[in-house]
Image (cartoon, rainbow, N blue to C red):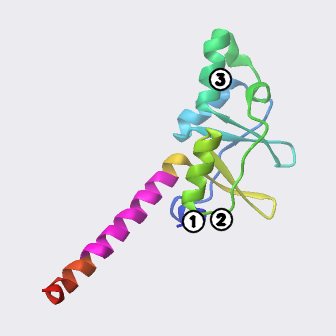
């Protein structure tokens, strides 16, 4: 399965935030949407960074509650890793593990068309493995009487 399959199931909605927004606003947005990361977009809608729950928690533990007024731009990850619809899930799992990140925005023709999380990838991969297992079981069951 590829990223395309995930986006077909979960939709292409991407929650974004402006670089000038506060960490408090980012935290509230993550909680309200039940997500783990926000794509930070500039004035023309271009991706300028990504901010995750982990980034916020790290800043809070470092600076205390005063960090809540910090603009997102100060702590966001600027070097964003992207993927595209054709990427295979096994490849994404490897990239996410190696890079130690849990969210990949999906880009198509320079446009943000979705986002996938490690949770999306694992869920889809498990479903894929379950279908393979069911198919094998069915095949064995159907052909077992020919074996003896």
Q: Between marks 2 and 1, how big is the CA–CA gap?
A: 7 Å
Reading the chain from its start, which is encountered first: label 3 or label 2?
A: 3
Camera-side mark, 3 or 2: 2
The residue carrying mark 1 is 2
Q: Between marks 3 and 2, how big is the CA–CA gap?
A: 32 Å
Q: Residue furthest front?
A: 148
Q: Residue at x 74, y 26 (%)?
A: 75
Q: Residue at x 57, y 38 (%)?
A: 36
Reading the chain from its start, which is encountered first: label 2 or label 1?
A: 1
Q: Dot 2, how many residues are within 10 Å of its Cα: few (below 14), some (14-19), or many (20+)? A: some
Could you tell me how many numbered marks the image carries? 3
Q: Residue at x 12, y 86 (%)?
A: 148
Camera-side mark, 1 or 3: 1
Question: Residue 83, position in %: x, y?
Answer: 69, 56
Q: Are dots 2 and 1 in contact, CB under 8 Å?
A: yes
Q: Between marks 1 and 3, how big is the CA–CA gap?
A: 35 Å
Q: Secondary structure at mark 2?
A: loop
The residue carrying mark 3 is 24
Query: Is residue 138 placed above or below 47 in the rendered structure?
Result: below
Question: Residue 18, position in %: x, y?
Answer: 77, 36
Q: Dot 1, how many residues are within 10 Å of its Cα: few (below 14), some (14-19), or many (20+)? A: some
Per the rendering, the mark at residue 70 is none
Q: Which residues are magenta?
A: 121-137
Query: Is residue 22 placed above or below 148 in the rendered structure?
Result: above
Query: Is residue 27 placed above or below 107 in the rendered structure?
Result: above
The residue lying toward the viewer, choosing from 148 and 86, is 148
Question: Residue 84, position in %: x, y?
Answer: 69, 61
Tell me, yes or no, if residue 55 can be seen here.
Answer: yes
The residue carrying mark 2 is 85
Q: Secondary structure at mark 3?
A: helix
Q: Secondary structure at mark 1?
A: loop
């Amino acid at each position: 399965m590829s990223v395309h399959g995930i986006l077909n199931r979960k939709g292409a909605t991407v929650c974004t935030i402006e670089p000038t927004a506060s960490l408090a606003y980012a935290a509230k947005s993550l909680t309200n949407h039940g997500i783990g990361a926000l794509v930070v977009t500039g004035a023309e809608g271009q991706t300028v960074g990504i901010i995750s729950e982990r980034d916020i928690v790290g800043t809070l533990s470092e600076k205390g509650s005063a960090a809540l007024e910090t603009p997102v731009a100060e702590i966001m990850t600027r070097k964003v890793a992207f993927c595209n619809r054709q990427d295979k899930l096994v490849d994404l799992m490897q990239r996410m593990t190696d890079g130690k990140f849990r969210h990949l925005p999906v880009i198509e023709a320079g446009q943000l068309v979705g986002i996938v999380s490690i949770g999306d990838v694992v869920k889809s991969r498990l479903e894929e493995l379950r279908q393979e297992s069911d198919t094998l079981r069915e095949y064995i069951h159907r052909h077992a009487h020919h074996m003896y």
